Image (cartoon, rainbow, N blue to C red):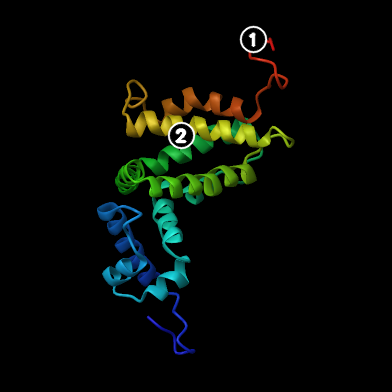
């Protein structure tokens, strides 16, 4: 699809959705490494230059597919204005659970995890995406004390959230898979709050107080 102004690709949400849908199918069927931009373009009925224009290439397109499943923007936008870790932690966890429990999101997540687990290239892109769009974005909005420990706190918070996701939605481990959403927030929320703002031992000192 082209604008009349010297062939510049049009910004068309319907075209973008068609491209992302074709990419999602291609990544799942062929794997990340074997999927090409030209193949996606052919399946979507667009030129490969249009994909580069909208997404910057295959990696950017795969990141968009990840974004539709992980949804960091949808989750973080709900809690970005909160200023205390005690308030932030349970609401962040509740927002994540609410997003992940949408049926269409669960399907995308299952597909995405399967692709990342069986394709090393996809796994590498997925890891890079999580670093930039989850850990770095959490660092921007989380009410953590400023200083050299901030990134460590954010990484610990991300690990808590990832652990809830893995045990509840991927491994379906009892009892967490059977708990209600409110119960998960009640039991895991304090751990998340502690990661964000709880007291830390001095560097080089273990939790038992020994070096």
Q: Which residue is drawn at 47% across and 83% down?
A: 8
Q: Helix, strand or loop at disc 1?
A: loop
Give the residue furthest to the left: 29
Vertical placement of residue 72 versus 146, above or below: below
The image quadrant that residue 59 belongs to is bottom left
Q: Residue at x 34, y 34 (%)?
A: 169
Vertical placement of residue 60 versus 207, above or below: below
Q: Which residue is drawn at 62% across and 42% down?
A: 139
Q: Is residue 123 visible?
A: yes
Give the label, 1 or 2, closer to the camera: 1
The image quadrant that residue 171 belongs to is top left
Q: In terms of depth relative to the viewer, which is nearer, 79 or 112?
A: 112
The image quadrant that residue 17 belongs to is bottom left
| Residue 85 horizontal/vertical position (percent) | 63, 32
Q: Is residue 4 left or right of residue 177?
A: right
Residue with the mark numbered 1 = 208
Vertical placement of residue 202 versus 140, above or below: above
Quarter of the image with the N terminus in it? bottom left
Q: Is residue 77 visible?
A: no
| Residue 131 horizontal/vertical position (percent) | 54, 45
Q: Which residue is drawn at 33% across and 27% down?
A: 177
Residue with the mark numbered 2 = 162
Q: Which mark is residue 176?
A: none
Badge 1 crowding class, 10 Å Cα cut-off, few under 14, some 14 to 19, many 20 or more, is few
Quarter of the image with the C terminus in it? top right
Q: In this view, does 56 lie to the left or right of 112?
A: right
Q: Helix, strand or loop at disc 2?
A: helix
How far is the residue under mark 1 from the one under mark 2? Answer: 26 Å
Q: In this view, does 62 lie to the left or right of 189?
A: left
Mark 1 or mark 2: which comes first in sequence? 2
Badge 2 crowding class, 10 Å Cα cut-off, few under 14, some 14 to 19, many 20 or more, is few
For the residues bearing labels 1 and 2, Cβ distance under 8 angstroms: no
């Amino acid at each position: 699809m082209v604008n009349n102004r010297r062939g510049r690709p049009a910004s068309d949400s319907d075209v973008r959705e068609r491209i992302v849908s074709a990419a999602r199918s291609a990544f799942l069927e062929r794997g990340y490494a074997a999927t090409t931009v030209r193949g996606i373009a052919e399946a979507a009925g667009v030129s490969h230059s249009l994909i580069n224009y909208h997404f910057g290439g295959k990696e950017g397109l795969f990141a968009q597919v990840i974004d539709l499943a992980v949804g960091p923007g949808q989750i973080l936008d709900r809690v970005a204005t909160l200023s205390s870790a005690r308030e932030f932690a349970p609401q962040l966890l509740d927002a994540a659970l609410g997003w992940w429990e949408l049926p269409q999101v669960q399907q995308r997540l299952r597909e995405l995890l399967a692709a990342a687990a069986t394709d090393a290239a996809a796994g590498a892109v997925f890891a890079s995406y999580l670093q930039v769009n989850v850990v770095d974005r959490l660092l921007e909005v989380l009410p953590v004390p400023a200083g050299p420990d901030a990134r460590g706190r954010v990484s610990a918070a991300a690990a808590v959230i990832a652990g809830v996701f893995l045990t509840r939605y991927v491994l379906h481990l009892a009892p967490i898979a059977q708990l209600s959403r409110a119960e998960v927030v009640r039991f895991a929320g304090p751990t998340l709050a502690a990661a964000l703002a709880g007291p830390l031992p001095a560097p080089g000192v273990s939790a038992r107080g020994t070096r």
